Image (tube, coloured by chain):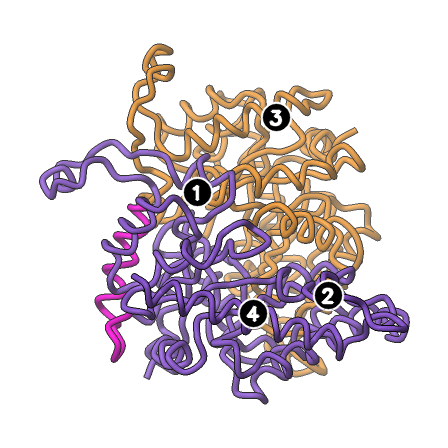
Chain colours: A orange, B purple
Amino acid sequence: MYNMDKLYEAVEAKGHVCVGLDTAIDYIPEKERLRASSEAEAVLAYNRAVIDATLDAAACYKVQIACYEELGLAGLNAYAQTLKYLRGKGALIIADIKRGDIADTARRYARAHFQGDFEADFVTISPYMGMDSVEPWLDWADKNGKGAFVLMRTSNKGMKDFEYLELKDDAASVQRGQGSRRLYDAVGDKLSALAEQRKGRYGYGAFGAVVGCTEQDEAAAIRARRANLFFLIPGYGAQGGGAEDAALLLRQGNGGVVNASRSILMAWSAAGLPTGGADNAFAAQAARKAAVEMRDAIRTAAAKR
Amino acid sequence: MYNMDKLYEAVEAKGHVCVGLDTAIDYIPEKERLRASSEAEAVLAYNRAVIDATLDAAACYKVQIACYEELGLAGLNAYAQTLKYLRGKGALIIADIKRGDIADTARRYARAHFQGDFEADFVTISPYMGMDSVEPWLDWADKNGKGAFVLMRTSNKGMKDFEYLELKDDAASVQRGQGSRRLYDAVGDKLSALAEQRKGRYGYGAFGAVVGCTEQDEAAAIRARRANLFFLIPGYGAQGGGAEDAALLLRQGNGGVVNASRSILMAWSAAGLPTGGADNAFAAQAARKAAVEMRDAIRTAAAKR
């Protein structure tokens, strides 16, 4: 059984929310920052509180390693401890590492993030250098079900610089009546072919794609053409996308998880502060409320389609 | 003064060799592996020996972080210690991390790798998500001279999958008589423009590009069109490129460093083994000899052009 199958089942049971643990130090209530022995300790304690409060409202957790690398070795220790804590709770973990390197190096990265201190269930991968930077990770799908989301069509402004560029039409694509492809279509075509080779019990490949909230027509077209790709969908909440936008990238009510980081981690700052200021318990309850509301909003939007 | 200017001067003084510290555990003589208290310790001790032996024959060192991430927290400690050792020797360091993420996340990665435990002089960056994943790093060029090499045209087989795809001609490019661009040309165009904005004293921008050894005509064309980009050139030695191939990507005898990893780190295995087997001192001398021969071969090839 692939981890992607487990993720499908988690979505069925708990909804589409992926809690993004992009825990910046200034997301944490001041009281807790002062109490902690170090920034890394404060981050870890905050993560534990948020995880405990959101377990039944989240399909999975995405941990953005940059937030931990930023704090050096102590930060990476907090990263390892966060993953360990999530594993102990039986939660599915996406390591948002966006690694992308070839052959031997990709194999090393896979060993780094699919076992040992930094073991996760899924990683994110950057495809720029080509499929030899993606394929070595796939051995782990066969071996122990590990999965990945490869960057395809992201929702940042700079997406237009390269991902969105139109390619010179190849005859085959014109024959299929698809017109000219964009770079992200070329990536998608390769990923669809990979997914076909390692297809799980719910019709999705062991490896999926990162596809951000975007224009309605484009989102619908992407979803229609990529039936066998499970999507990791960023751009919700603080980045501007809403439940309706995210729902366009789902398929029969599943087929994707929707990441929100700041809107969950910082929900406490928008709530009426308690006497004595916010602490982790207060912040965790606000995070829970935000995750539940997001879950329900996406379920409602998905049901309408 | 940008670090890229320092690298230019290092090439003038010491030649074009970039020693790649992709130190896999099986590159290290067995005797030393058994002697060390851990794999990470063995890697660090090996690095120190190789660094000491190659300092005057190398323009810089490239440290492939995947080799260290693979060993978990202990490995990243060895990574940090390797960088610290190099800094102590005054060597220029390229952190081969190929990070690529947007906005806030890119700023976090920059703080992770341009200061603190993992401080390096240069990083490598993957451009897939667009220029908003590159530009945040540039603040550090203004602040303290830091530099980067952005993946442009690599030398791996999978390069053909995306980097090499032809783009639909835009009118401007056709007018300039350049015909249709490939994806890597689009990346190069953006990088050339960036380099023009932050140009150092030798005509090269603070940020350069990763360009691998390739066909002669293509290499000459890339070099001609990218006069203001300093190149990090992989693919030498074990990956098949030779001194003549590398020289095609140089410009007036400078403008690039050429990375070799395995052919330097593993040079000892091709030498006649001493009685009692190889140790780090023996391996380091073999590494030195390989680096010096490589330096001389590239200088000779560059002088012929």
Query: Which badge, 4 or 2, is on the more N-terminal residue?
Result: 4
Residue A238: % across, % down: 45, 53
Q: Label 1's element?
A: loop
- Mark nearer the viewer, 3 or 1: 3
CA distance for labels 4 and 2: 19 Å
- Residue assigned mark 1: A154
Residue B92: % across, % down: 49, 79
- Residue assigned mark 4: B19
Q: Are marks 1 and 2 on the same chain?
A: no
| Quadrant of the image occupied by residue B237 | bottom right
The amino acid type found where label 1 is placed reads Thr
CA distance for labels 3 and 4: 38 Å
Q: Residues within 10 Å of mark 1 (few under 14, many from 20)?
A: many
- Residue assigned mark 3: A195
The amino acid type found where label 4 is placed reads Val
CA distance for labels 3 and 1: 19 Å
Q: Do the CB atoms of the residues marked 4 and 2 lie less than 8 Å apart?
A: no
Q: Chain of mark 3?
A: A
Residue B160: % across, % down: 44, 36
Dominant SS type (magenta): helix
- Residue assigned mark 2: B271
The residue depicted at 27 percent of the width and 65 percent of the height is: B195
Give the magenta-colored segment's residue range.
Answer: B185-204
Q: Are marks 2 and 3 on the same chain?
A: no
